[in-house]
Amino acid sequence: MRVGTGESVVVLLEAVPRRASSIWTRAYLRLLLSGDTVCALLACVCVLGLRLIAGAYVPLVEFLLGLGLVIAWPVALMMGGAYRQRANGEGTEEFKAVFNGGAGLMATVAITAYATQAAIARSFVMAMLPLALLTTLYYRYRMRKRLHRRRAVGDYMRQVIAVGHRESILDLVVQFRRQPYHGMRVVGACLPDGSIDVDLDGIPVLGSFGDVAGVVERERADAVAVLACPELDGAALRRLAWSLESARTDLFVAPALLDVAGPRISIKPVAGMPLLHVEHPEFDGMRGFVKSVFDRVVAGLALLVLALPLLGIALLIRLTSPGPAFFYQTRVGKSGKEFRVFKYRTMVVDAERLKGALLEANEFDGVLFKIRNDPRITRVGAFLRKYSLDELPQLLNVLRGEMSLVGPRPPLPEEVAAYGADVRRRLMVKPGMTGLWQVSGRSDLTWEESVRLDLRYVENWSLILDLQILWKTWSVVTRGEGAY
């Protein structure tokens, strides 16, 4: 199970609802089951109703068949894994399970009808089941958003005991607090030496590594998150899992490769030992070609659709502030190649000259220069920055192949000059108009968090991930959060 986009990655070993989480988990699953059944019923009523309105004859057997498909719908989804606890709430696993279950039922009905030569109305296979699938996917999406809103105010959370070193636990706590929609709340920690006077940002230290099982029982925790540390080797982890087994407590283990997840990782048994196989990331080849074509096609269509609004923004800038409407700046792209990025001008014309006098007011903790209330920003520029409209001209950079729709933030040459060897890996892919940094906090992120998200994207990029980020970007940008 992957816990999120900007935080430690943990692997799920056991997943059985317990204690505080079991009540709301069962209620949530019942709600999903009821809603899925209603979605199938609505699809059936819609299709049969339209046939009746059109004057078609609908025999009783087809009404019974429709009712049977409504009943079979949640069963098919269950067989696809759509009601597993860890499949719901985040990631794409839930939607994949719904799609697989629905597609499986459609295939079963179609194959059965063909094999038995049964006179089943094609409207069931061609209309009702696809409609049920679409409505169920939408219902699941709305339920997920509802769950995230409840978790944002502290409801529907799982109580977690973190096991590891101080720095790793602090990082986990910060990330869970930043993104509560994952439903994880650290309520206690176990350190190697069990120190009780260590500051863990308000998280109590409840014991050492040998006390984990007792701490879980005493605190009635739902899960244990073991962060990478040399003290907990294979034998120690095995004993810890045994100690938690009777209580059926979830056990999460952070692998050493925190930024690698998804299809690049697989477990293969070798000589009786389960070995973690990590494939190398693919930056070029067919996947890179498909990504490039997708970027340019979408950028070209977007420029055509937004031509008039883009022109209107340019005129507004010229009318409200002396100077050109566009701002050109040298940035560093893939493999360290420099290019000129296109943006709308959001600052006064001599902004670069005024930058020197504002260096002491820099609010960023890395090589970036950011000020929340930068006096150089114009009134129209502040609006454009809040909703990222100033970056729309970068569609031209995407069309020219210098940028991608999704990728790491395009850095300045002076920023790249300050990069360490690890950070330079950001330059393995094209920079993007949006990225994990955009949907995970934007300018509210620290320099370390921004770099980690960019590196995570480089290690795990895919077209599916790009589509997810583009979808999330819309809601982030419309709220105007973290932009200045």
Image: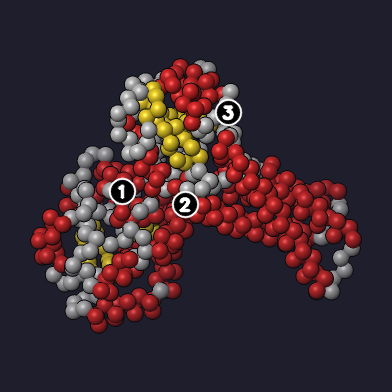
Neighbour tally class for label 2: few under 14, some 14-19, many 20 plus, Cα within 10 Å: few
Q: Which mark is residue 153?
A: 2
Mark 1 surroundings within 10 Å by alpha-carbon count, few (fewer than 14), some (14 through 19), many (20 or more): many
Instruction: Indicate the amino acid at tag 2.
Output: Val
Residue pictured at 41% horizontal, 60% vertical: 476
Q: Name the residue under label 3.
A: 248
Cα distance in 3D space between marks 2 and 1:
25 Å
Mark 3 and mark 1 lie on one chain; the one further toward the N terminus is 3
Q: Which of marks 2 and 1 is nearer the N terminus?
A: 2
Q: Mark 1 points at which residue?
A: 450
Quarter of the view holding residue 452: top left
Query: Counting residues from the N terminus, which is met first, the one under dot 3 or under dot 2?
Result: 2
Q: Could you tell me residue 460's position as x and y percent?
A: 41, 43
Tag 1: residue type?
Ser
Q: What element carries label 2?
A: loop
* Vertical order, 224 against 433 (above or below): above
The answer to whether the residues at label 3 and label 1 have Cβ atoms under 8 Å apart is no
Secondary structure of the residue carrying numbered label 1: helix
Residue displayed at 58% across by 34% down: 18
